[in-house]
Image (tube, grey):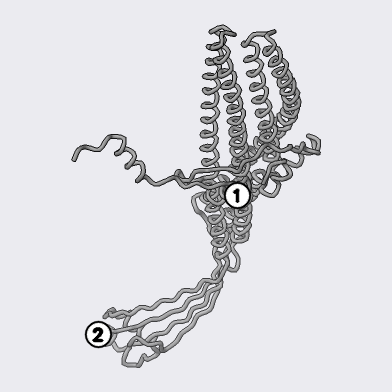
Amino acid sequence: MGRLPLIVIVIALVATLPLARGRTFPLSAAVRYALRHSSAQALARARQAQARAALRAAQSEGSVRATASYGYLFSDNPLLALSAELERRQVSAQAFTPSTLNSPGVRRLGTASLSLAWPLYEGGAIHDAVRAGRFAKQAAGRAGARTRQRIVATVVTAYEGLVMAKAGVRVARGAVAVAARHAHTTRRLYARGRILHSDALTAAVNLGAAREFLLGAQNDVANARTDLALAMGAPAGLAIHIPAQTFGPVAMPRRPLRQLLRVALRHRADVAALRAKIRALRAQGAAARGRSSLHVTLTAQSQWFSRVPTFRHNAWTVGAVISKSLYDGGHNGDRAAELEARAAETEAALTGLEDRIRRSVVTAYDALYNAAQRLILARATVQRARRNVALVQVLYGEGRTILLNLLNADQGLVKAREDELAARYALARNRAALADACGTLSPATLPALGLKP
């Protein structure tokens, strides 16, 4: 039996490879998928869980603490032997004779105990620790909300980029179709001796350039698809597809810039997160100072003593303990100073964030209106380019112009359509960027942006 041809082996190997799974995502589904699978969202959820656990730990510091224990001892220590007799309430006069005290023999004692302690007052440390935990939980929640907004913004930008890339492929295919028609026409006319060979070659070169343009547009689609998959947190084996669609009208903001700036500083979740973090740090500092204050703890204990492992001969104790740290090497004070410094650092970060927010709102606002003006100009240019193509086609058919003018007119129309797509994309992207900068972007607000959910 002879060897199989190489091509047959290659086909057999390819046939055994698993096919990439494909799935079509409308914009709303892409956003939901990203919010479920994004690593940034998983990190935000973990930090929120950490903040909730820290709050529960702080709240538990002020609760009653119960401890149970059991021990069993063998000892010939005279003091322990006498103590065992007393604790079992079985002491006799014989236990106080010199011979018994000096040589008590081996004594056995089982001790079971239940202890309760309630920190009644901790100098405000517990109260401040609970306040710090609540502020930290609030900060983590607001930071998580901002993470969700950033995920939505990233997905929207990547999604609209894929829409534009696919629209660019449609433009490129139209250019290839027109160039192929010109190449076919010039070959036919050259065969009949009606045009020069250079015209036919020019048309062929133009067709090759159009095909290269199409390849570039298809590569842009592949890159845009990869960007969307990364934004969504999709696994490598999942092929991302979107339904066929075009850019819809993009609503312009109705609020003036000054009002949008106020909205951003009031509603941005990361601003609220930093403000809550500052409160948490200051509450932690107050808790550190409180640990050097007067402490009052109520205690209660019940014990059972027996020669064998049973619960007999109960004794109980109830009391209060008042304590105060006289010197700790400056630990609590230094810890409070450190937390105050961190709060001041966070305040400076908050000021910087507010400045960046103002700049991002102004930039997105200006870019949005600039894109709207570009779109108006691009639409007018497309209309003029189409009329120019129709006119040059008539002139070329009448022999009143050369082929190069016709090809230039076609290329001008393709360029105008590209500019229109770019303006549409800039309009959609900057509208989403403005909503993101104002802190109002969410899956529910996508229709108001003119984006198909």
Of the pair 349 and 453, the residue shown nearer to us: 453
Element at badge 2? loop
Res. 110 image quadrant: bottom left
Residue for point 59% across, 21% down? 181
In the drawing, does residue 342 fall left or right of residue 380?
left
Q: Of the residues tagged 1 and 2, which is closer to the observer? A: 1
Residue 149 image position (x, y, % from top left) = 63, 45
Res. 157 image quadrant: top right
Question: Residue lying farthest left?
Answer: 1
Residue for point 56% across, 72% down? 298
**Location of mark 2 (residue):** 105
Residue for point 53% across, 12% down? 191
**Which badge, 1 or 2, is on the more N-terminal residue?**
1
Above or below, 113 against 11 in this view is below
Q: From where the camera sits, is residue 67 visible?
A: yes
Above or below, 429 against 453 in this view is above
**Location of mark 1 (residue):** 29
